[in-house]
């Protein structure tokens, strides 16, 4: 609970609110470049939510995940609004916030932080397994989007898509978020401390 309290305090910091807003806007831009393969959609908007979770923790990233889903619908409505996907977006923020928030090396000035890289990989794998494979597949069945498929066939297609995408996701999340962390440190002159 301490992590959530510390993260909730980030809402009082104007810098945190502004950076979170910019990352949410960036997520919307990235989302607009989604590649629709018919059976699956490929996008890298998770990077912005992961950055928010890493910098500001689960309380902020839960809100950011939900806001991204709602804004994504308002910007590019594709059918009806489904609140279950907003909850899933919030859970995605929770994953990144819990795993990556303030989990940094105590040594300052290190550009190569293996602990953080491992945490980012774990967070992405957890996101893929829990959010992409389990929650989104269940939500698609709940809302009737996969009526013509069995659960096994739907999961098999999603597993194949995510296995192909996961190595690229891991390279991106480690590369981009380590760059975000370095930029954050340079711009704001502070390094996030361990929880």
Image: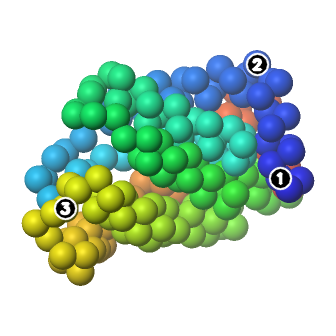
Is 156 rendered above or below residue 93?
below
Contact between marks 2 and 1 (CB within 8 A): the answer is: no
- Residue shown at 86% from the left, 56% from the top: 1
Gap between marks 1 and 3 measured at Cα: 38 Å
Is 105 rendered above or below residue 179?
below
Could you say where residue 6 lies in the image, as x and y percent from the top left?
A: 86, 44
Which corner quadrant of the image does residue 122 belong to?
A: bottom right
Gap between marks 2 and 1 measured at Cα: 19 Å
- Residue shown at 56% from the left, 46% from the top: 90
- Residue shown at 76% from the left, 56% from the top: 104
Residue on which the image places disc 1: 3
Could you say where residue 145 lies in the image, as x and y percent from the top left?
A: 20, 55
Mark 1 residue element: helix
Q: Residue 146 carries which label?
A: 3
Q: Residues within 10 Å of mark 1 (few under 14, many from 20)?
A: some
Gap between marks 2 and 3 measured at Cα: 43 Å
Residue on which the image places disc 2: 14
């Amino acid at each position: 609970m301490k992590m959530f309290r510390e993260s909730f305090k980030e809402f009082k910091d104007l810098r945190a609110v502004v950076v979170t807003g910019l990352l949410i806007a960036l997520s919307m831009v990235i989302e607009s470049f989604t590649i629709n393969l018919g059976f699956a959609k490929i996008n890298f908007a998770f990077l912005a939510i992961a950055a928010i979770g890493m910098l500001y923790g689960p309380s902020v990233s839960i809100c950011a995940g939900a806001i991204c889903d709602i804004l994504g619908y308002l910007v590019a409505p594709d059918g009806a609004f489904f609140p279950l996907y907003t909850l899933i977006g919030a859970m995605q923020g929770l994953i990144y916030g819990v795993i990556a928030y303030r989990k940094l090396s105590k040594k300052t000035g290190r550009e190569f932080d293996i602990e953080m890289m491992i945490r980012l990989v774990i967070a992405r794998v957890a996101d893929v397994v829990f959010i992409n494979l389990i929650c989104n597949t269940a939500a698609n069945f709940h809302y009737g989007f996969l009526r013509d498929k069995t659960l096994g066939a739907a999961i098999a297609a999603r597993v194949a898509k995510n296995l192909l995408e996961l190595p690229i996701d891991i390279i991106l999340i480690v590369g981009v978020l380590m760059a975000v962390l370095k930029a954050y440190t340079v711009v704001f002159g502070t390094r996030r401390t361990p929880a």
